[in-house]
Image (spheres, coloured by chain):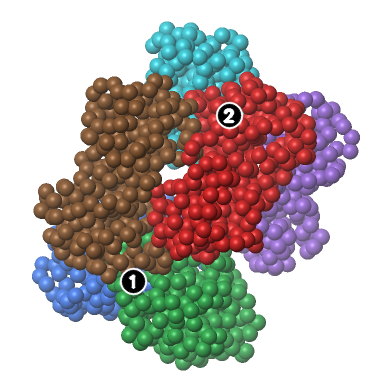
Chain colours: A red, B brown, C green, D blue, E purple, F cyan
C-alpha cells in the first residue's frame, strides 16, 4: 500500500488533530513510498530503528517519537537515529497521546478490556481532555489477587502501594505511562485503585494521604498494547504483515 | 532562639532570593515564636509533620514543601498537613532548589565531598542556572566498584545503566533528585558518568545513545544530605538540638 | 445535610466551571462533614470567620475568599484565618464571579430585580463574558430620586457623579463591586446611568467625558445581596437555618 | 526653548528608560516646536487639556496620560482630548511611574521631605522595583496628630484606618496614588503606618489583620507634588513660566 | 446615512468579532456624524487621508489601518495622519483580515471569482482560521498564459517562480498580500500553483523545494479588490457615492 | 582541523550565547570529524548543500539555517536537505543574528567598512539589542551617486525610495536583510538615509512619512559579506581552503 494512503488513514483513524500534544504526531521520517511490511515498538530509540530496518520493515510505528516540542540539531544520538532511518529508507510514524486515548486500540482501552472493566468513563486529565479510563471490576478482588492478574497481563512484577482504605479493588482507574499525578483525581472520583506505569517520588505520598491503592506496572509495560493493537488493525484493513519489536526498559 | 531570627538567618544563608523556584521557599507554616528543637526531613508529608510534632520539635525543615506554584484549597491531604502543624504550633520551613544548589550544605555539595570529587565545576541546568556539580575522582574506578561506594553512602541498592564507552568512572556529574534529563548535558561536558536520584522512562535510552554511565541512587536517598548538613550548621550557629526523621519512599 | 452533597449542589447551581476566575471558587476550607447551620458574609476576613464559628455555623459562605491566584504561606493574617476555621471545624465555601453573574441569586440579578429593571440584557465584560445586567426603568426618574431609591435599598449614602447628558435615569447598567471600568461600555450601549460599587480615581473622568451618570453605592453594599439570596435558596432546598454576618467596610 | 531639547532633558532627568510602565511615558502629543509657557496637572482629562490651551501654555505635563498599554481608536473622549490638543498645537508630556519614583521631584520624595522623614529606604514594590519611600519621623506622634499634619499638607480630610498595634506613628511608608496593596509589605518591613492615596475594598481588612495604621489621603491629593516640583525644576533650568491646573477628583 | 448606522452595519457584515486581528478593525477615527460620500483605499497613509479629505469624502475605508497592536504617541507621521483626518472631520473605517477573508467582498473571494475558480475550499491558515481560497481552473493552462491573465486583472507585471513539477496551472491557491509563508500548505493540499502578493527572501526556496509554482502579483495589487467591492455593496445598500483612491506602492 | 575544535572556536568567536535567536545557531548537522575544506553560502537550501558536497567541502557555513523555532518532521524539502548532508558526511554550521551583528566579520560591519562610514554607533534594534551600524560618510553625496556606489558593491540594481528631506546622503544606517521596520528608528536618530536589503509593503509609506531616504539593495545581496569574511578569518586561523557558493534569490 502507498505510504501516503497509509499516513492519511492513520491520521484520521487516530484523530491526530484533536490533541494539543507537542510530540509532532504523524509521519516523523519520510522513507520509501510503498509499505509492504510494518514494525511497531514503544520507543523510537536507535536500537529499535536499526532493528526495524534489519527486519525488512518499510514503516516503523512507535508510541514515543523523536521530538518533544523543540527543534533538535542533527548531531549526537538524534543524528544517529535519523541517519539510520534515512539510510534504510524507513518510514517512522509516531502516535503518542492519540494512542493512549484511542477508544478502540488505545493503551488504556486495551488494558481496560483485558481486565474486563465495566461501566467505564473517561479519567486522567491531560491538557484539557481525559486520556485514561475508569470503571468497575465485575466482582471485588483483593489488591494482591488483582496485582497478580496485572502481572500475568504484562509479564513483569508490579510495585504495589496499598494506600487505600481497604486492601481490595472494585473501582479502578487506568492510565498508561506516567500517571502518578492523577491520584488526587482518582480520589475525587471515588476510585479505590489506580493502575499506572511509572512511579514518581514527588507523588509517593499521594497514595497514602489520598487513600488510594496504586499499582505501578511499568511505563514500558503499560504502553505495549496500543502499537500492537494498531498493527493488528492495519493488518485487517490493508493486509500488511507486522511484528512487535520488544525492547523493554525496566522502568 | 526566636523564630523570626532563625528564618531571617536561613533565608540569607540559603540565598533564597536568587532562585526562580515555584516552591515558595521559606517559612510555609508559622508556628510558635521560640524555637528550641529542630526536626529535618526530605518531604513534608503528613507522616513527617506528625512525627516532628510528636518528637517535640518547634521547627520542621524539609526539602520538599507544600506548594508547587498554585494555590491549594484547605481540603483533603493538604488540609490534614496544615491542620497537624497548626494544632502543634509547629513551624515548617522549606528549602527546595536553594538546598540542592548550596555550595556548602547543598545535597550535591555534600555528595561531591563524600565522593572526594576534585576540580569541581557547576553542572545541571535548571531555570537558567546550574544546581549540580561535576568533577574528577582522584583515581579511575570500575563502574561496579564506584556503584558500591555510592551504595555504602546511601545504604540502598543503586540502579546502574552502563551506557558509557568504558565501564569505568573518572569524570562524574552529580545531580540530586530527578536528574535524568541532564544526560545530554553530561555528554556535552565530556563526563563519563552521571550520578542522580530517580530514573525516568523517557530518558532511559539517553544513557546508551549518548554513551554515559548513569547511576540512579534514589530520589529520596540523594536528598537526605542537605537537610542534615543544614541542621548541623544550625546547631553550630545557635546551639539547637535536632534530629533527622527518616521516611524513605523507595523511589 | 452532608457537606459533600451541599458542595456538589452549590458547584452545579452556581455553574462554577464556566468562569475563568483565579479566586478558587468552591470549598476553600474543609470542616465538619455534616452541615446544620449556615452563615453568609461578603468577606472571609478573620472577624467574619470568628463570628461564624462563635455563632455555631458549620458552613460559612462568602463572596470574597482567601486566594487570588497565588499560593500563600500559612503565616500572618492568612494563617490566623485558616487556623480559626480549622479550630472550629468550620467549612468555608467561596463564590466570587459566579455569584456576581448568577441569573437568579447573583448580586446584579438581585439589584436589578429590586429596582424593577425591564428588558434586561447582559452588561459588564469580565474575562470574555458579561457578569452584570442592563435594562430600563419602568418610568424615567430624576438622578436624585433614583439615588434615593438606591440609598433606601442599601441603607448607605451614595456618591453621585452626574456626568450624563441629562440628570435623569431611564436606561441603567448594574455592576456590583468594582465596576467603574465599564463606563465606556455603558456609553457604547447607550445607557444613561451606571450603578456600581466602588469609585476609582483612574476612571473619575470617564463619567464626565463619556457622558454617563454614575452612582457609586459601595463595594460592600452592592455585594451583600448574592450571599443572602443564596442562603435563602439553601433554606428552601435543604431546610437549613442561616444568618447574615454584617461587617461593612465603608468602601 | 525648543520642544525637542526639553523632551530630551525630561526623558533623561526622569530616567524614563528604567521603568517597565505601560503608560507610554514621554511626549504623547506633539505640538508646537517652541515652548514658552508650561502647565502641569495630575490628569490629562479633556478639561485639563482645554484649560492648558486656554491659558496659553505650549506644553502640558501630567502624571496620568492617555494610554495604558492598548491602542485606542480616535473616537469618544479619547478623540476629544487628542483633538483639543492638536487644535491648540499643545504638546502633552506624560510621566507616570518615573514621577512617583524620582528621588528629587517624585511624589513620594516630596511627601517624605514635607513630613521630615529620616533614615529613608526604598518601599513599595512595583514591577520588580520599589517606587515609594519608608522612613522614621523625628519623634513619635499620635496617629490623630499625624493625620492632622497630612491634612494640612494636602488641604483635604483623610480616611484613617487605625489597624496598628498602637495609635502612634514612628516608622512610616509613603506610597502615592493607589498603594493599599502594599500593607503586607509595610508589615513585613516593621512599619507601623502607611500613608497612601486611594482606599480599595479588597485591601480593607489588611490594615486590621496585618496590624498597620493606614492613612488614605486621596489619590489626587498625593499626586499633585511631583508635577509641581518638576515644573519648578524646569523654571530653574530653562527659565520657563508655569502654572498648576487644579482639577481635584475627590478620590 | 448616519455614521453610527453605517459602522454597525459594516461591523456586522464583515463579522469583525470573529477575527483575532491586532489591527483594531472598525472605526479608527471618528469624524462627522452623517456620511454622504465614501472614499476607499488600500492604505491609510497621510497621502490617502489627505486625498480623501480633498475629494469631499466623509468616510474613508481602508484595508490597512493606523494600529498594529501597540499604542502610538501622537507624534511624527502618526500625528500627521490623525491631524489631517480630524481637521477634515473625516471618518476612518479599517477592515484588515475580515476583508481578506470575507466570502463575498473579500480580496480572495473577488480574485477567485475573476479567475473563475471552481470547487473552492478554504486555504491559507492565519491565527487558527483560513483566510484564502483554493480551487480548480475550468481547464488546465500553461503557467505563462495564466500569469498573463493575472497581469490583465491587476494591470501590473508579475514575478513568476516556476517551481512546480510541470509548468501548467490547474489547482490554484489564492492568498492576497503577504502569503509566501503558505507554500508548504499549498503543497500539502496538492495545489500546483499559489497566487499571492509579496515575495519574501526567507520563502524563496520553498517554491522550488516544495515543487509549487508561485505567482507574486504585488501586495498592493492583490488588495485593491476588497475595498472596491465593499464600496459597491455600500452603494447598493445605502445609495452612497464612492471613489477608489489609487496609490500603488510597487511592492 | 578537527570539527569539534572548529565548532568551539566558531561558537566563541561569534559569541553565540549572547543572542536570543530562535535559529539554533551552531552546528546544525554533524558530519565528518575532520575538516579540510570549507564552503560558505547565504542559505542552506538543497541546492547549496548539494553544491557544497559536490565541491568536496567537509563543512558548509551558512547565514540562514534549517530551523526557525519549531521542530520539523523529516519529510519533504527538509528531509532532502538533511539527507543530502548526511549522505555526504557534510557538516552544516549556521550563524544567523551573530553574523549580522559581529563587530569584525558581521554583514553590517563589512558593509560599513566598504562604504567608509565614520563615527559609527549601534543601530537596528532586534530582541533587545542592536545588530546594525549607523555612521557618517566622509563627505555628503547625492542619493543617486551613493546608490551607484552601493550597486558597485553588490553588483545588483537597488530600489531607491527618496523619502528624505533632501536627496543627499550624509548620516547613514546600515541593516542587512529585512530592515525596513527600522525606518522610524533611523528618523529618531537623525539619520538621513537607511541602507537595507528587502522592501516590505507594510513599511512602504514610512520612508516618505518619516522623511528618510531608503535604499533596498537586496536581502541576499546584503548578506553575502559575513560568511565570506568569516571564511577568510578561518583561513587565517586554521589555514583552511574555502569557496563561496553563489545562489542569488533576486529578493
Total numbered badges shown on the rendered structure = 2
Q: Residues within 10 Å of mark 1 (few under 14, many from 20)?
A: many
Q: Look at mark 1 in the image and give the residue it sits on.
A: C82
Q: Nearer the viewer, mark 2 or mark 1?
A: 2
- The residue at the point 34 percent across, 82 percent down is C53
Residue A48 got which mark? 2
Residue E77 got which mark? none
| Quarter the N terminus of chain F occupies | top left
Give the secondary structure at mark 1.
helix
Rendered position, B62 above or below E143: below
Q: Is residue B121 visible?
A: no
Rendered position, C27 above or below A186: below
Q: CA distance from mark 2 to mark 1?
A: 55 Å
Q: Quadrant of residue A85?
A: top right
Q: Is residue E196 left or right of residue A44?
A: right
Q: Is residue D49 left or right of residue E206?
A: left
Nearer the observer, D224 or A78 = A78
Indicate the chain on which mark 1 is placed.
C
Q: Residue A148, percent across and down?
A: 53, 49
Q: Quadrant of residue A237?
A: top right
Q: Residue B143, percent across and down?
A: 35, 26
Amino acid at each position: 500500500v502507498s505510504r501516503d494512503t497509509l499516513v492519511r488513514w492513520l491520521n484520521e483513524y487516530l484523530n491526530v488533530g484533536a490533541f494539543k500534544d507537542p510530540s509532532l504526531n504523524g509521519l516523523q521520517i519520510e522513507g520509501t513510498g510503498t509499505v509492504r511490511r510494518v514494525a511497531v515498538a514503544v520507543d523510537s530509540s536507535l536500537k529499535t530503528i536499526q532493528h526495524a530496518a534489519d527486519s525488512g520493515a518499510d514503516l516503523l510505528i512507535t508510541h514515543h517519537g523523536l521530538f518533544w516540542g523543540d527543534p533538535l540539531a542533527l548531531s549526537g544520538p538524534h543524528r544517529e537515529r535519523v541517519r539510520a532511518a534515512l539510510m534504510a529508507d524507513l518510514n517512522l510514524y509516531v502516535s503518542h497521546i492519540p494512542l493512549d486515548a484511542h477508544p478502540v486500540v488505545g493503551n488504556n482501552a486495551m488494558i481496560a478490556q483485558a481486565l474486563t472493566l465495566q461501566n467505564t468513563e473517561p479519567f486522567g486529565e491531560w491538557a484539557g481532555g481525559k486520556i485514561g479510563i475508569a470503571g468497575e471490576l465485575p466482582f471485588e478482588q483483593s489488591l494482591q489477587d488483582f496485582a497478580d492478574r496485572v502481572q500475568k497481563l504484562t509479564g513483569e512484577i508490579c510495585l504495589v502501594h496499598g494506600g487505600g482504605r481497604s486492601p481490595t479493588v472494585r473501582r479502578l482507574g487506568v492510565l498508561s505511562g506516567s500517571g502518578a499525578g492523577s491520584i488526587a483525581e482518582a480520589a475525587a472520583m471515588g476510585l479505590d485503585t489506580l493502575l499506572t506505569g511509572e512511579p514518581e517520588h514527588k507523588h509517593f505520598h499521594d497514595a497514602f494521604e489520598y487513600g488510594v491503592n496504586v499499582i505501578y506496572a511499568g511505563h514500558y509495560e503499560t504502553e505495549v498494547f496500543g502499537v500492537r493493537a494498531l498493527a493488528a488493525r492495519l493488518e485487517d484493513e490493508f493486509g500488511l504483515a507486522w511484528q512487535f519489536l520488544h525492547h523493554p526498559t525496566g522502568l
